[in-house]
Image (spheres, helix red, strand yellow):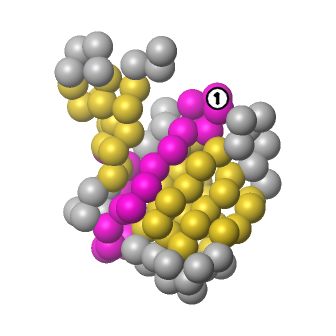
Amino acid sequence: EWPLRPGGSDDATCRMFDVRSDNEIGIYGNEQIMCGITSVSFSKSGRLLFAGYDDFNCHVWDVLKEDKIHQLVGHENRVSCLSVTDDGMALCTGSWDSFLKIWN
């Protein structure tokens, strides 16, 4: 089982926790992002962290470098859920705009 667990917060940061040592091991945030996070998920490799935000976007973080590397733009309301496909080839985001979007 993967020992790392991500979490998102209303303080606009994602935080990574190692459940084996019960420690926080990473913080993913950006001063330009000032809204809450509704959902988080890893890529299948674990290298990317996807986070759905109240700013209507999904931000993509490099887990090792703790840097934002991409932003998925297209919803017209907050991103409320997201999930990576079983084969790891696509990401689905759901929004309060009542649409699901598939990103690959």
Q: Which residue is mark 1?
A: 45
Q: Tell me the chief SS of the magenta region.
A: loop
* Three-letter amino acid code of the residue under disc 1: Ser
Residue at position x 33%, y 52% in the image = 8
Quarter residue 38 falls in: bottom left
Instruction: Say if 69 sits above or below 27 in the image.
Output: below
43 relative position to 81: left or right? right
Percent across and percent down for residue 36 are 32, 67
- Residue 49 versus residue 2: which sits nearer the camera? 2
Quadrant holding the C terminus = bottom right
Residue 66 x, y percent position in the rendering? 44, 43
Q: Say whether residue 33 is visible.
A: yes
Seen in the image, is 43 located left or right of residue 90?
Answer: left
Tell me where residue 22 sits by quadrant: top left
Up-down relation of residue 49 to residue 20 (above or below): below
Figure disc tally: 1
Which residue: 74% across, 61% down? 102
Q: Residue 32 in the image: x percent, y percent?
A: 38, 72
Nearer to the camera, 74 or 92: 92
Q: Range of the magenta residues?
A: 27-47
Q: Residues within 10 Å of mark 1 (few under 14, many from 20)?
A: few
Query: Residue shown at 49%/33% (left/top)?
Result: 64
Question: Residue 78 vs residue 5: left or right?
Answer: right
Q: Secondary structure at mark 1?
A: loop
Name the spot of residue 63 as percent of width and height, x first: 49, 37
> Which residue lies at the image location 75% right of the left edge and 49% below the top edge?
90
State yes or no: residue 28 in magenta. Answer: yes
Residue 7's place in the image compared with 31, above or below, is above
